[in-house]
Image (cartoon, rainbow, N blue to C red):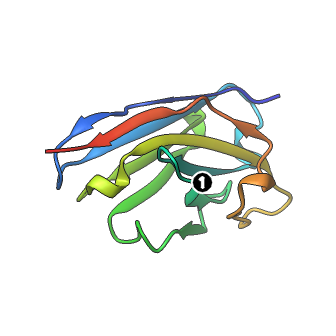
Amino acid sequence: QVQLVESGGGLVPPGGSLRLSCAASARTFTSLAMGWFRQAPGKEREFVVSISWSGGTTLYADSVKGRFTISRDNGKYTVYLQMNSLRPEDTAVYYCAAKAAQFRLSVFRRADQYDSWGRGTQVTVSS
């Protein structure tokens, strides 16, 4: 059982930056692939990025590549999402997700592949 808690959301102007955090209450964090998804009002949940449990592999959605960066600190059981050059279309609730992975370099793009989810943190990009 993995409990995930997101934090760091807020209101920022276009072009601004935020860093989201996802804290996991699991000693098995080092064997979990992690992901970020987002969901805007009236839209389906959208893949943002995934990182392997080793940190050696990352997979970004085209819409955020070059602007967002995922990282993890296994010693703190935490994954981060640094978001730069934010746009109004980035406005959404951002969810952290975890999946038990057999291999160090595995990443996952589909929401239904993940085992555990946080409750989300709101990111609003508005002038």
> Which quadrant of the structure image shows residue 119?
top right
Quadrant occupied by the C terminus: top left
Report the residue at 71% width, 44% height from top.
Answer: 98
SS label for mark 1: loop
64 relative position to 45: left or right: left
Q: Residue furthest left?
A: 127
On screen, residue 105 above or below 38: below
On screen, residue 83 above or below 79: below
Report the residue at 41% width, 34% height from top.
Answer: 122
Q: Check disc 1 and give the amino acid type.
A: Glu
Report the residue at 57% width, 69% height from top.
Answer: 59
97 relative position to 39: left or right: right
15 relative position to 43: left or right: left
Q: How many marks?
A: 1
**Residue located beneath label 1 in the image:** 44
**Circle 1: is it few (<14), some (14-19), or many (20+) Cα within 10 Å?**
few
